[in-house]
Image (cartoon, coloured by chain):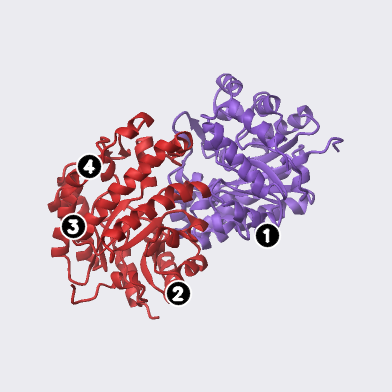
Chain colours: A purple, B red
């Protein structure tokens, strides 16, 4: 048990803290020169994820520099398909790629080796909890089944992940099997992260926003609800943040239907709607990452607007999507100072 | 004046017609073998747009094949930057490209030559109205200023058009100038299309969905409202469909704030919300185009769901985005038959 309170955890428990605790999605990333240095010596991107020495180092870098209230495990949502032997590779400039999954292959996918394959990631979590300051929360994470499935089926990212939508329409039974499999191994993976010391976990559904209403219920809500139920049955105190990027109006019942403790909000979520969502529990977000590139008045206005509209309830200040490589590290300093220096 | 009523126009005037009239976004396109034939002999993609013989032919092809209730002018939203001498080119597999617009260049953009540059497109509209069946509505269109600006600034399509968002944050004055310029020349272009025989026009804001709330008001709503006001001041009877793809919750006041007659809905818009929007006037949409690729039950269910939820009000049946090259032409036949054969 920590003697110093971890503010992010307190907010996840429903408390309102002002100024709100903050961290940034993808805070360990290419915008930081120290990250680029480590990245250059780590080998491939997956080597970086699977080598605790490197993964611990890059996770800690933004904590040292900015003192964020949470560290998030450095890893990638595609370590799950990698554990399923889908030949995942990250090529500079091309984005992630893997062998596209044919419908005939779905039945043969085996999740048994996931946790042994991901043991180095769990080791990273364990070391991080030892090395982090007492007051810094440690977040684990994984991708949501829908989002992970979209990459597995297309073999890459595409403008609107139409291959996975087509697969789901044409092969509903096999697609359901795939989502269930991903939900179950991802839940095991999150439990292992929690047992290794993660204070909370986030489920990233980066491609939730391209789904129609019925498909959102079936492919986004249902598998995440399955994961949350599985994790909470085994680790009742576990705190879970669910981030369905681009879901808009469909976020309305998302917390209740998934059982997640907190809801991540992308930068397109109107703040009046965010306030409604906050009445039911904590929210996290939602500054446009491009404002951190721009800096100056656009950064200040964006921060102030969020604090003003959401500061009176349980809020974890964050971006509405990952920080981009173009972000200026000094703008992040300005962001941290403005959030922490703000007066309720 | 037409003796046979044009159902799409009647719906745009607020009438409820059942079964609803239908057309498909990008209905003249690569999924049709006759289109690919014409495309192969037309030269470049812009040659196809600028040669009335070819553009008339491909516009008519889906009307001959399916008897849609509306034909939409074959052209592209990027003819406007082409008219602004931005060196627009379409390279197979690369998507549209043009010279990226630097902030220093904005002030020098001149819209005076737009209508002379686009005279062949207006000639196409004129010929189409002569050749189309009496009962077939003819739709003109253009891109919304925000969407056109995103391509002009990045010089291409990008995953979330961050270059334009950054430009807007960093150079609000120049960005406002650009949006106003695009709004004004686009309004002139729409007026010319209407004068040449278009029964109605559609404004495509394909990238509206990546904007935060304040930016949506400033970059999406305001310029479209400026265009609608300009067109309606000069052509009071003109009917305008505005399609802000991905705008979600922000569609709530979009009709009222832009002054558009009808609202296009993408496939992620929940139908209960669509029903709310329909209380204020006609809506158009919103079948997932991937269902037309899949065919069968997923196509039938998608159609039935829309007809059931939106059939009791003013509806133009359409897809929620352009039909894709992978769509099976026979699935389109099935779609047309199912919509037309449905019973209220």
Q: Residue at x 64, y 40 (%)?
A: A318
Q: Residue at x 36, y 50 (%)?
A: B144
Mark 2 lies on residue: B308
Q: Chain of mark 3?
A: B
State whether discs 1 and 3 lie on one chain: no
State the CA–CA distance, disc 2 to disc 3: 35 Å
Q: Nearer the viewer, mark 2 or mark 3?
A: 3
In percent of width and height, residue A16 lies at 76, 48
Q: Is residue B212 visible?
A: no
Q: Is residue A11 left or right of residue A178?
A: right
State the CA–CA distance, disc 4 to disc 2: 47 Å
Q: State the SS at label 2.
A: helix
Mark 4 lies on residue: B112
Q: State the SS at label 3.
A: helix
Q: Residues within 10 Å of mark 1 (few under 14, many from 20)?
A: some
Q: Residue A137 versus residue B167: which sits nearer the camera?
A: B167
State whether discs 4 and 2 lie on one chain: yes
Q: Chain of mark 4?
A: B
Q: Nearer the viewer, mark 1 or mark 4?
A: 4
In percent of width and height, residue A342 lies at 70, 37
State whether discs 1 and 2 lie on one chain: no
Mark 1 lies on residue: A256
Q: Nearer the viewer, mark 1 or mark 3?
A: 3
State whether discs 2 and 3 lie on one chain: yes
Q: Is residue B248 left or right of residue A187?
A: left
> Which of the image's four quarters has the N terminus of chain A?
top right
Mark 3 lies on residue: B125
Q: Nearer the viewer, mark 4 or mark 2?
A: 4
């Amino acid at each position: 048990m920590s003697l110093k309170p971890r503010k992010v955890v307190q907010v996840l428990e429903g408390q309102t803290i002002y100024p709100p605790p903050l961290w940034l999605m993808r805070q360990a990333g290419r915008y930081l020169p120290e990250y680029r240095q480590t990245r250059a010596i780590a080998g491939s991107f997956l080597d970086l994820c699977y080598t605790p020495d490197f993964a611990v180092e890059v996770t800690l870098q933004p904590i040292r520099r900015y003192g964020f209230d949470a560290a998030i495990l450095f890893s990638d949502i595609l370590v799950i398909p990698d554990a399923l032997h889908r030949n995942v590779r990250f090529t500079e400039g091309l984005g992630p790629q893997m062998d596209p999954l044919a419908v005939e292959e779905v039945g043969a996918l085996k999740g048994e080796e996931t946790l042994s394959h991901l043991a180095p990631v769990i080791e990273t979590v364990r070391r991080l909890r030892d090395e982090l300051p007492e007051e810094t929360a440690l977040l684990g994470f994984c991708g949501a089944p829908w989002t992970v499935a979209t990459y597995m089926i297309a073999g890459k990212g595409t403008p609107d992940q139409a291959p996975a939508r087509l697969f789901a329409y044409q092969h509903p039974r096999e697609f359901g099997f795939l989502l269930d499999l991903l939900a179950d191994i991802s839940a095991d993976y999150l439990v292992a992260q929690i047992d290794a010391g993660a204070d909370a976990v986030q489920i990233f559904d980066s491609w939730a926003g391209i789904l129609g209403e019925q498909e959102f219920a079936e492919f986004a809500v249902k598998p995440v609800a399955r994961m949350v139920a599985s994790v909470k049955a085994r680790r009742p105190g576990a705190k879970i943040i669910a981030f369905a990027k681009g879901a808009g109006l469909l976020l309305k019942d998302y917390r209740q239907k998934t059982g997640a403790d907190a809801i991540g909000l992308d930068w397109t979520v109107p703040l009046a709607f965010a306030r409604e969502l906050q009445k039911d529990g904590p929210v996290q977000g939602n500054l446009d990452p491009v404002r951190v590139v721009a800096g100056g008045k656009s950064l200040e206005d964006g921060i102030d607007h969020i604090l003003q509209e959401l500061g009176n309830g349980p809020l974890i200040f964050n971006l509405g999507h990952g920080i981009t490589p173009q972000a200026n590290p000094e703008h992040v300093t300005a962001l941290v100072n403005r959030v922490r220096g703000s007066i309720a």
